[in-house]
Image (cartoon, rainbow, N blue to C red):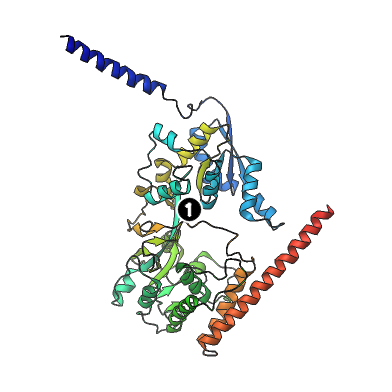
Amino acid sequence: MMRKKFSLLLVSLLALTLLLSACSEKLALEPLDAEQNVKLKVLFWEEDYFYREYGNYFTMKYPNVEFEVISTAKLQQEMEKSYEDYQEAMYKFIEENQPDILMLQPDQYEKLASEGKLYELDTIMKQEKFDTESFLPSVMQMLKDKGGGKTYGLTATFGAQVLYYNADLFQKNGVELPKNQMTWDQVLQLAQRFPTSGSDKDRIYGLKMQGMGGASDLVMNLGRTENLRWVDKEGKKVQFEAESWRKVYQLATNALKSGAIYQENRDMPQSGDTMESYMSRNPFTVGRAAMTVSSSWYMNEISRAKDQIKDFKPFQWGVVTAPVNPAEPNMTDNMYLSEIMSVNAKSANTRAAWEFVKFVNGPEMARMQSRQMTGNLPTRKEFIKDKENHDLSAFYLLTPKFTTYNSKEYPMPNSFYMTQNTVIDEQTKQFLNNKQSMEQTIANIQKQLQDGLDKGWQEDEVKKKKDKEKEAKK
């Protein structure tokens, strides 16, 4: 009898201890007072876009919350007048304005988290049982890795490039469909299995590159996948004569010479374009290209084509992963995040800021965004779908690299980007027209790119000197 009473007493004490422990667990954040007026400062690049995508929906739920959008467009204007490092200027901009909510890119998120400037979210997410299980695991892992093992932000959407293919053209020409994790070599070989006969208006192409479709687009895409850089780490010497770039250029020019790659005329007049004429110029959109590499937004363009293009003929399409580096077949740098939402560790309105981050990254917003299909895709996997139920797993199948941008390594003057396109397009045209050898073409590209790089740095120095003189006179 005594033993039974003792057991009951022990159970009661244990239950009381657990209850007291639960009651004594301090809430990470006090509940938001629905009657209290709150003003949240938000760092975002454009005010109208912020309200259209996020702000208007949130204020419908919390009408007492007001936003002050701190546009980074202001920072961009300031950067045009100086040569201050953009990333450093951004951190200075954040420090001066102290926004409650920050929309960050991965490298910015990583730096600010490491400096203790972002509010840690794991505790509050656990207390409130906020569902993180349906997020893409790769995205959540990246946020933790770049947060030093903790989560300091969430992202509602992501973008990615994939390889779109026209299943009807493949079937008609007896070519097997593309597969996930193909290399550029395999994709270009596949493209060359399609006929190249016919007039420019009627013929089909094996591959249409994203963008203008010039030689430079193909060469740069191949090089980027292979992790190649135009310049050395100091940004002073062009590396195009390196063996790795030679192989890439040889692969690209062989494909271009075959006639399987669509190259748009960059000088084609485009003033007065209608939506129909603009969309009709893309051979994949009108069913005349077997493959194209493009982003998630391109699904919208295919969908809209039937309403925008007269006599449009629908076709069956699908997607596989964008070409991979054979040395890293399970990795991709074609997936990107641009809106990591974080709370400032110094915010006086932490609860309201968290409510916003929670709302925007919740399942309700994910469902809404999946219906809109504005370009990016929801990071909650269950909502990654389109109206025609295509298999979209290629967008998130591979492990993203999310490489940190470092402006102090491999720097290049702004003018050099246009120089790259012009030099490679012009020299490749000379080679394809049999006016010079491969060796001479590579040598010319190396020299002209180096001259352009040197000139770009000189121009930057002159402008920097003039800007300093102007500042000194004020």
Image-quadrant location for residue 413: bottom right
**Is residue 156 something one can see in this rendering?**
no
Whether residue 427 can be seen here: yes
Q: Name the residue nearer the viewer: 351 or 210.
A: 351
Q: Is residue 219 above or below residue 76?
A: below
User: As displayed, is residue 154 above or below residue 31?
Assistant: below
On screen, 180 above or below 5?
A: below
In the displayed image of the protein, which residue is found farthest to the front? 3
Residue farthest left in this picture: 1
| Quadrant hosting residue 98 | top right
- Check the picture and name the quadrant holding the N terminus: top left
In-front residue for pair 419/278: 419
Amino acid at the residue labelled 1: Leu
Residue drawn 37% across and 22% down? Answer: 21
Residue 280 in percent (x, y) is at 47, 70
Q: Position of residue 8 (x, y in %)?
A: 22, 14
In the picture, measured across the screen, residue 145 lies left or right of residue 418, that is left
Which residue is rendered at x = 55% and y = 50% of the image?
Answer: 108
Q: Quadrant of residue 411?
A: bottom right
Residue 132 shown left or right of residue 417 in the figure: left
Q: What residue sits right under mark 1 in the picture?
A: 337
Image: 82 above or below 127: below
Residue 466 point in image, percent of width and height: 78, 62
Find the residue positioned furthest to the right: 473
Dot 1 surroundings within 10 Å: few (below 14), some, or many (20 or more)? some
Q: Position of residue 208 (x, y in %)?
A: 44, 72
Q: Residue at x 38, y 79 (%)?
A: 192
Question: SS class of the residue under badge 1?
Answer: loop
